[in-house]
Amino acid sequence: MYKAITIIIFSTLFSFTAVQAEEYFSTKLCETDQYESIQAQRGDTWNRLFPDPDQRNIVQRLNRMNTRLKSGMYVAVPPELETIDIMALSPFPFTISSPGSKLIVVDLTLLAWGAYDTEGVLLKWGPASGGREWCYDIKEPGKTVMGRFQIYDVRGKNCISKQFPVEKGGAPMPYAMFFQGGYALHGSDEVPGYNASHGCVRLFNEDAKWLNEEFVGQPGRTKVLVLPY
């Protein structure tokens, strides 16, 4: 079952090589002929470039980032931005074989997650940022654990890390959903367009809230599949 899902997902249009630390996903997108490319200039902000909130949301999700723009970086813009629906940009198939329970697929090559219902219908998808190859502050690899899991603990909007930042903890982990030991899906204001965490999977805050409150429900009823990256 999961093998079939993996094959389907990797055969989608967005078959990029693994995104290494600090290599922006937007750069990969701009290398294709599917999107227009904008180079951010000094002083540019998301609001300045995309004043319409719906269009801004779509562009941020396509580029997998909610952090500040940096001068010189490239931003991919979909054609027909004024009318396109975010689901049209999904890197996941709209249907898969029934997983038998609710399923969250995490693809950290594509920097994205997808939520499937029990019938295998994609309900929603969004950007993600997983563990980086090497964490310099702890001098250890930081890649997210890969494989098949299930959500075993769900926390609220005030959840914080007891481990990071190093020595003091306190990093916000709103709407955390733990799936293996200390590994969790959680909201973040720092989804930068590449894998940047110590192992957890960062999501846009509104996506983590939706998954936590409207999709996952009680612990033990939602599977998580983290694909190799």
Image (spheres, helix red, strand yellow):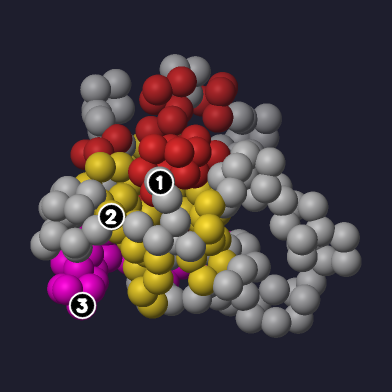
Q: Secondary structure at mark 2?
A: strand
- Could you say which disc has been placed on residue 92 in the image? none
Residue under numbered circle 3: 3
Tell me what residue is drawn at x 35 percent, y 68 percent: 225
Outermost residue toward the right in this view: 167
The boundaries of the magenta stretch are: 1-23
Mark nearer the N terminus (2 vs 3): 3
Marks 2 and 1 sit apart, C-alpha to C-alpha, by 10 Å
The span from disc 2 to disc 3 (Cα, nearest Å) is 17 Å
**How far across and down, in percent of the image, does residue 50 sit?**
47, 24
In this rendering, which labeled residue sits more in front, label 1 or label 3?
1
Cα separation between marks 1 and 3: 26 Å
Q: In the displayed structure, does residue 103 sit left or right of residue 153? A: left
Give the label, 2 or 3, closer to the camera: 2
Looking at marks 2 and 1 on the same chain, the residue that comes earlier in the sequence is marked by 2
Seen as rendered, the residue at the extreme top is 52
The residue tagged 2 is 102
Q: Amino acid at mark 3?
A: Lys
x, y percentage for residue 41? Answer: 61, 35
Q: Nearer the viewer, residue 153 or 17?
A: 153
Location of the N terminus by quadrant is bottom left
Corner quadrant of residue 84: top left
Disc 2 vs disc 1: Cβ atoms closer than 8 Å?
A: yes
Question: Is residue 164 one of those drawn in magenta?
Answer: no
Q: Which disc, if any, is residue 217?
A: 1
Identify the main secondary structure in magenta.
loop
What's the amino acid at mark 1? Answer: Gly
Residue ID at (54%, 39%): 205
Q: Would you say 228 lies left or right of 39 here?
A: left
